[in-house]
Image: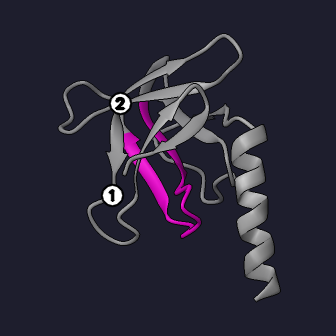
């Protein structure tokens, strides 16, 4: 129980004080071991294919979102000058933890 309480406290602390950043993976796939907080941009030959990250709810699920305009659905990724990502539209997981959130300027904004 103490570990769960500590994890909840630490997650709230990280959310408040540490922004998510972009890491680059070259090739066609996400790396087998995903970073805990940062988003991984998969690009090949200068083309952005997808972005992946670990679900911010703590369930440890890997989320991969396609950035290719021909895909349906697809997302747009904007990276600010300090490497802070913004994704549009929101991310809504229809199964599993059922999280629904926005990624805005490196922060997670939860939907009600």
Q: Nearer the viewer, residue 58 or 77?
A: 58
Q: Which residue is mark 1?
A: 93
Query: Would you say the residues marked 2 and 1 are in contact, meaning their CB atoms lie under 8 Å apart?
Result: no
- From the viewer's side, name the closer residue of 110 and 25: 110
| Secondary structure of residue under mark 2 | loop
- Mark 1: give few (<14), some (14-19) or many (20+) Cα within 10 Å: few
The percent coordinates of residue 21 (x first, y second) are: 67, 32
Residue found 35% across the figure and 64% down from its top: 98
Which percent across, then down, holds residue 3?
80, 81
Asked if residue 33 is positioned above or below residue 19 in the image, the reply reads below
Q: Quadrant of residue 108?
A: top right
Q: Which residue is mark 2?
A: 67
Q: Nearer the viewer, residue 47 or 66?
A: 66
Asked if residue 76 lies left or right of residue 29, the reply is: left
Report crowding for label 2: few under 14, some 14 to 19, many 20 or more residues within 10 A (C-alpha). many
Quadrant of the rendered structure where residue 91 is?
A: top left
Tell me what residue is drawn at x 40 percent, y 69 percent. 97
Magenta run includes residue 85: no
In this image, 35 relative to 105: left or right?
Answer: right
Instruction: Of the two numbered discs 2 and 1 on the same chain, state the one appearing first in sequence.
Output: 2
Image quadrant containing the N terminus: bottom right
Q: Nearer the viewer, mark 2 or mark 1?
A: 1
Identify whether 67 is placed above or below 78. Answer: below
Label 1, secondary structure: give it: loop
**Extreme residue in the front direction:** 112
Identify whether 27 is placed above or below 100. Answer: above
Residue segment shown in magenta: 49-65
- Name the residue at 52% across, 57% down: 55
> Residue drawn at (26%, 62%), measured in percent from left and top?
94
């Amino acid at each position: 129980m103490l570990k769960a309480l500590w994890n909840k406290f630490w997650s709230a602390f990280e959310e408040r004080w540490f922004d998510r950043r972009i890491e680059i993976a070259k090739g066609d796939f996400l790396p087998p071991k995903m970073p805990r907080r940062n988003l991984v941009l998969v690009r090949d030959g200068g083309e952005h294919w997808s972005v992946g990250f670990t679900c911010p709810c703590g369930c440890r699920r890997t989320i991969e979102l396609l950035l290719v305009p021909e895909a349906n659905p697809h997302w747009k990724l904007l990276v600010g000058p300090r490497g802070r990502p913004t994704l549009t539209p929101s991310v809504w997981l229809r199964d599993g933890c059922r999280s629904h959130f926005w990624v805005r300027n490196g922060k997670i904004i939860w939907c009600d």
